[in-house]
Every structure is written in C-alpha cells, then in structure tokens.
Image: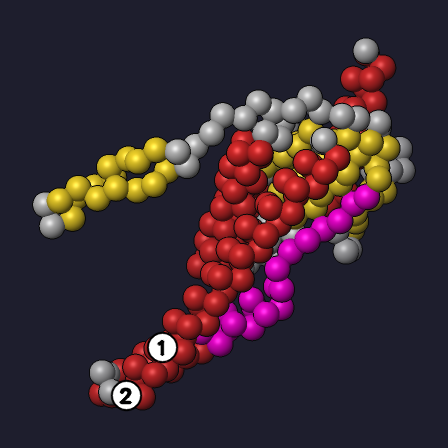
Amino acid sequence: MRFAMIGLKDDKPYLALVAERTVEPYQPSGYRLVVDVNSWKYGIAWGLIRNGKLITWRTEKPDTFLINTLYHQAVDRERRAGKLRRLGYGGTTVVNRVRKQAFTRRSRIYRITRDKAYFLASKLVRKALRYGALLVIDDMIEESRRELLEEGLPRDVIKLLMSNLKRFVHQLETLAQWYGVPYEFKRLPSKVCPVCQHELTQEEGRIMICENCGFKAPRDLVPIHWALREHNYEFEQF
C-alpha cells in the first residue's frame, strides 16, 4: 500500500491511497473457465470445463427489456423538451423537469450495465478461484459492435453497451490479477465449425449449423466447443 500524488488543488498537492500487492498465479487444476464476451444484448456466455468435458454452461446479461424501455422513454422526453423549447418555453420549470426525467433514465441505463459488469466479473473470478481454474477469455468486442450495427440499433445505445462491455473485460482482468487467477485471451470462433472447421450457417434463434458435418449448437456455445476441442488436442499432444 502506498500514497501517490495525483494532482494539485488550490495550489496544494492532494494524495490518493493506492493499494497494490504482488500475487503469484496459482497452478491451474484440471478446470478451465471459458468466457465468451458478447454484446450485453446477447449476454456473456461462460462454460466450466473439467478434463475436456463441459460441466456447466450459462449466458448472463442485464435486463435488456428494461434497458430498451428506459432508452425509448428518455428519447421521448428529450424530443418533448426540444419541442417545448422551440415553442418558446425554454428554461421553464416544465422543460427542466422533462429534461431531468430523460437524464434520470439514461443514468439508470448506465448504472444497470455498469453494475452487471462488476457483479459478473466478480462472480466469474470467484468461480475460477473455487475450482482452481484457468480463466480463458474470448474478447471479441469489435465483432460484437459490428453485430449491433448490423441490427440497426441507435449509435448512442451501441456506444453505451460497448463502453460497459469494455468495463467488464477490464474488471475481469483486474480481479484476476489481484487474486492470482491465471488467465489468457484466446480467439474462439463462433462462425466456424469446431468439428470440421467449415463456415457455420446461422438460423433463427442464433442457432449455428454446419452444412458439411451436421454440427449444431447455439451461437454462444460454439466458442465453448472450440475450447473443448483445443483442450482435447493439447491432451492428445501431451
């Protein structure tokens, strides 16, 4: 633990308390905790693997219905405030109240995604500690952004979702370092077959199908299958 001067205020230095420690990562057991980073719209998929077998798998995300509702409520109030200003009511109590309502809803969207990012990062690191697992992170943030753009979501919504997605990845890495959880970033495709490596076709419900070998799985589970494939390959090589 140490003090560090981080700036000046009223020509006087002010200090911040910075906590730091050195932790040696533990030796991974036979477990791997694989985290597939998607946009918040589809959730963060994670799978616990033990000796080449999938023990459990789950997708977690914030309440996207609530986020969407709050966003449209905020936009509606912003438009209403704009219309009132154009009619000459700018600066009145009514306009200020409507603008505050819009700001409150946008702030709540931010808090929902931020809190979910911190909660989920903490949960996954605790799970890795519990099983002595190697944490494998598939950080495909740019691919997630392109997917959201293709769906035609408003750019300010995309910006908000992606900002807190990056916050999640940063928090996950920070906590892993703090608690000595060994981790690695690894590319785990969601559009390539983990069996025969042919391109997958996406059907309704984000189900991926390989027309070459018949492989079929939810899109968010495909990266987990790649992790299983690589684990078994490493075992065979060993």
65 magenta-colored: yes
In this rendering, is residue 67 above or below 202? below
Q: Amino acid at mark 1?
A: Lys
Secondary structure beneath disc 1? helix
In this rendering, is residue 140 above or below 207? above
Q: Circle 2 sits on which residue? A: 93
Task: Name the spot of residue 51 as percent of width and height, x first.
Answer: 84, 27
Task: Name the spot of residue 62 as percent of width and height, x first.
Answer: 61, 60
Q: Which residues are magenta?
A: 56-75
For marks 2 and 1, the one nearer the N-term is 2
Q: Residue furthest top?
A: 238
Q: CA distance from mark 2 to mark 1?
A: 10 Å
Task: Name the spot of residue 104 as percent of width and height, x first.
Answer: 42, 72
Q: Circle 1 sits on which residue? A: 100
Quarter of the image with the C terminus in it: top right
Q: Residue furthest right?
A: 214
Circle 1 packing at 10 Å, graded few (<14), some (14-19), many (20+), is some
Near-viewer residue (132 or 145):
132
Residue 132 visible in the picture: yes
Residue 26's image quarter?
top right
Q: Amino acid at mark 2?
A: Thr
Residue at 78% from the left image edge and 17% from the top image edge: 234
Near-viewer residue (4 or 52):
4
46 magenta-colored: no
Residue at 62% from the left image edge and 64% from the top image edge: 63
Main secondary structure along the magenta-highlighted residues: helix
Q: Which mark is residue 111?
A: none
